[in-house]
Image: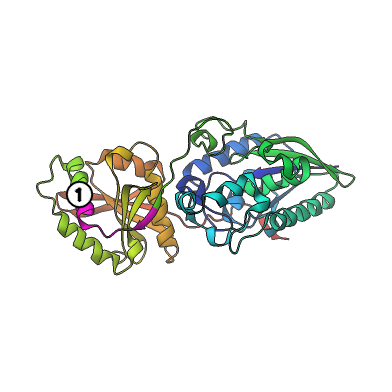
Amino acid sequence: MTRLYIVRHAEAEGNLFRRIHGQYDTTLTVNGLRQVEALRDRFAGENVDACYSSDLVRTRTTAQAVWVPKGLPLRLEPRFREVALGCWEDVPFGQLEREEPEMMARFSADPYHWRVEGAETVEQYSGRFLAALEEVARAHDGQTVAIFTHGCVIRAMEMRLFYGPDRIPEIAHCDNTGVSLLEYEGGRFRSVYLNDNSHLPPELSTFARQNWWRQQGTRKDRNLWFRPLGDRDWYAACRREAWRLVYGDDGDCDGAAFYRDALAGAAGEPWALCQAMLGEEPAGLVQLNLAASRRAGHVAFLYLLPEFRGQGLGIQLVGQAVSFFRARGKSRLELAVSPANGRALAFYRRYGFAETGTVPGRYGELLRLEWNGELTRDLGPELVSV
């Protein structure tokens, strides 16, 4: 008999930024790294003979909870990857909810009728996952194996092995770092338990902050979508409100000049100055500067209207900036914040921005902050491709 721990990766950028990530390669969040430590504690007393992972960074990094302390090689298996999402990769959930609500509903509730251009079908991604799973189980008879993989393929595995397509609503979703234990013997899989996240206190659980997965209740997550901004007056009004928030009045705020600077920094790229939308309501903006730095992507201004603050939406603005600059070869973000803007400083520090110095500002020095989104390096004794 082979014992198989199936582990979902820790919280990654897509989970936090509310963007759909299949095989789009991303890093773990600050909270995700804390989840890895909790997972390490969970497995501290467990015997594990072999460790496998999808070859994507978020799973490889999560797998360090087991392969590093136990001194095992990490075997990379691409068939344990998440579903390939085709034209949906790295699209904000808010955009898909607005433009493709029927397919979004089918994605979880009716995957056999879900079709997206360039994406795998449920038969394809569950088939390659199960083929790899059985190969690993046969190769490690009498041993215990940990496999690090992704949420959609875990759910498809459970559907194929234990539920069937007629019972999809009964299949629970797996929290980040959720653990399932299977046993394989005589060509058959048996579940000991599925999707257990008991090692995570509520403050670390990703699902504790989200509502989309809940089978009861009417609360929904609030997901933004984005469009290029061409409204000078609306932009100027946002600048003035932000100025009053920091400096007490807007007497010295030249909204028209700020808008001219924004257009110059965008260098003709419409998505460098975009409006964040919640449903059909403007909620904020993202202003990026393509000319400011060659080393890192420069964020000139992130803003939410007052009525949308305090709802966990701000990090989605950061996610839009990350997506924009990563597509242009920049894995780091930099920005400047007034020392008087304590709320903004607390926000950026919470999500992994670090102070790297100061830059001159109109009313004195500003703090320069940087976010490092480089793909995490694997740590440990050995990597093995299989």
The residue sitting at the right extreme is 186
Q: From the viewer's perspective, tell me whether residue 104 is left or right of residue 305.
A: right
- The residue closer to the viewer here, 93 or 143, is 93
- The residue closer to the viewer here, 312 or 138, is 312
Image quarter for residue 306? top left
Image quarter for residue 300? bottom left
Which quadrant of the rendered structure holds the C terminus? bottom right
At label 1, the amino acid type is: Ala
The residue sitting at the front extreme is 102
Would residue 64 be seen by someone viewing this image from the given angle?
no
* Residue at x 37%, y 61% (from the top left corner): 296
- The residue closer to the viewer here, 33 or 321, is 321
105 w.r.t. 382: above or below:
above
Please count the marks in the image. Answer: 1
Q: From the viewer's perspective, tell me whether residue 317 is left or right of residue 118.
A: left
The magenta region covers 226-239
* Residue 22 belongs to the span the image colors magenta: no
x, y percentage for residue 35? 55, 39
Q: From the viewer's perspective, tell me whether residue 124 is left or right of residue 347.
A: right
Residue position for label 1: 237
x, y percentage for residue 119? 61, 60
* Residue at x 47%, y 45% (from the top left corner): 16
Q: Residues within 10 Å of mark 1 (few under 14, many from 20)?
A: few
x, y percentage for residue 330? 42, 63
* Residue 229 belongs to the span the image colors magenta: yes
* Residue at x 28%, y 43% (from the top left corner): 305
* Residue at x 59%, y 33% (from the top left corner): 215
